Amino acid sequence: MPLIKSNQAIGLDASTTVFQLASALKDVEQLSVITNGLATFTALQHRPGIRAHLTGGESEEQNASLVGPLAVGSLSSFLLNTCFLSTTCIDPVIGTSEPTMAQVEVKKAMADASQSSLPRTHRSSVRGP
């Protein structure tokens, strides 16, 4: 994966779209990954070359993630090369949309801790004029 290289620190949100990216991660060394996604953490925690970190926080059952002040605060302890964030919908006028404000806060904190962020969305989630 050219966007993810060894010796980096990346953030991955709790979405199923980004989980697919996490599942494809291989052939990396010394990659640190912080996520608020329980499934993503579980998939990465024993993978060779990857050090997985979980944000902590309050459980949000809607998407098996951790949210809240603890999740947001822990992200400020990291300096990430990049993060991969999904969105429920992208609209050319309103921008992105999320199902809960708690998810918005975590994704904002992850983006703030990153030198760059790369949005991910399923093609059916993009609205055009």
Image (spheres, helix red, strand yellow):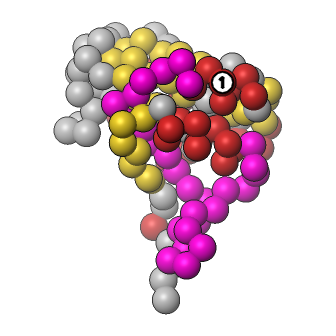
**Few, some or many residues within 10 Å of mark 1 (<14, 14–19, 20+):** some
Q: Is residue 57 left or right of residue 6?
A: right
Residue 8 position within the rendered picture, expressed as x and y whole percent measured from the top left: 30, 22
Which residue sits at x=75%, y=49%?
101
Which residue sits at x=50%, y=72%?
126
Residue that mark 1 sits on:
73
Amino acid under disc 1:
Gly
Residue 74 position within the rendered picture, expressed as x and y whole percent measured from the top left: 62, 20
Which residue sits at x=79%, y=27%?
58
Q: Is residue 60 visible?
A: yes
Q: Is disc 1 placed on a helix, strand or loop?
A: helix
Which residue sits at x=73%, y=56%?
99
Instruction: Tell which of 70 and 63 is nearer to you.
Output: 70
With respect to residue 37, does 54 lie above or below? Answer: above
Q: Quadrant of residue 63?
A: top right
Query: What residue range appears in magenta?
Result: 76-102
With respect to residue 41, does 51 lie above or below? Answer: above
